[in-house]
Image (cartoon, helix red, strand yellow):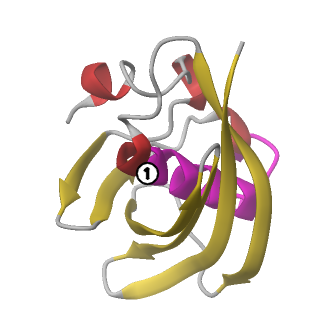
């Protein structure tokens, strides 16, 4: 699915929609985002040596994982992060690179969903984590 299709699932817009595309592959969600270099989060992180902040990598993982829960994310429902565990950052991500994500659900107890994911650039692991969400109505 492209950005337009993702906006039917995710509540994120404009600068905070951090996926270019995503697909379901068996029990995993696979996504990608090309770091253009003009993103708001690179302006001060770090001048002369831009690096995607770790928290942004985690947000990209979360948005990828939401593709797995698209049937629960009906109109008026929003996914909220409820926890992050076993977070590890391995390699920096820089402008011009394409971040590839792979996430899978490891447990569900609605409205809570538990996932794990990794963010890669090529064959380099950049970040991995376990995380949880609550999908809540208004």
**Label 1 crowd (10 A; few <14 / some 14-19 / many >=20):** many
Q: Which of 125 and 23 lies nearest the eye of the viewer?
A: 23
Instruction: State the extent of the magenta-drawn residues as a range.
Output: 42-66
Q: How many marks?
A: 1
Q: Is residue 134 visible?
A: yes
Percent from the top left, x then y, of residue 109? 61, 57
State yes or no: residue 61 in magenta.
Answer: yes
As displayed, is residue 133 above or below residue 77? below
Which residue is labeled 1 in the image?
64
Q: Which of 117 and 123 lies nearest the eye of the viewer?
A: 117
Left/right placement of residue 20 relative to residue 50 reads left
Residue at position x 28%, y 19% in the image: 4
As displayed, is residue 50 above or below residue 7? below
Q: Which of 122 and 138 lies nearest the eye of the viewer?
A: 138
Left/right placement of residue 107 relative to residue 2 reads right
Left/right placement of residue 99 relative to residue 126 reads left
Residue placed farthest to the front in the image? Answer: 109
Q: Quadrant of residue 108?
A: bottom right
Q: Is residue 34 visible?
A: no
As displayed, is residue 74 above or below residue 56? above
Q: What SS does tag 1 mark? A: helix
As displayed, is residue 25 above or below residue 7? below
State yes or no: residue 127 in magenta.
Answer: no
Residue at position x 60%, y 29% in the image: 16
Q: Which of 25 and 17 lies nearest the eye of the viewer?
A: 25
Residue at position x 48%, y 12% in the image: 75
Quadrant (top left/top right/bottom left/bottom right) for the N terminus: top left
Q: Quadrant of residue 129?
A: bottom right
Percent from the top left, x then y, of residue 25? 17, 63
Percent from the top left, x then y, of residue 74? 45, 20
Left/right placement of residue 33 relative to residue 136 reads left
């Amino acid at each position: 699915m492209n950005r337009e299709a993702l906006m039917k699932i995710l509540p994120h817009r404009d600068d905070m929609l951090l996926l270019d595309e995503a697909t379901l592959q068996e029990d995993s969600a696979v996504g990608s985002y090309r770091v253009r270099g003009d993103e708001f989060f690179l302006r001060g992180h770090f001048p002369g040596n831009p690096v995607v902040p770790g928290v942004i990598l985690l947000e990209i993982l979360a948005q990828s994982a939401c593709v797995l829960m698209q049937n629960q994310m009906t109109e008026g429902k929003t996914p909220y992060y409820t926890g992050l565990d076993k977070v590890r950052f391995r390699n920096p991500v820089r402008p011009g690179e394409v971040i590839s994500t792979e996430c899978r659900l490891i447990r569900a107890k609605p409205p809570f969903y538990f996932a794990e994911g990794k963010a890669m650039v090529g064959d380099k692991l950049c970040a991995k984590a376990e995380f949880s969400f609550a999908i809540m109505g208004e």
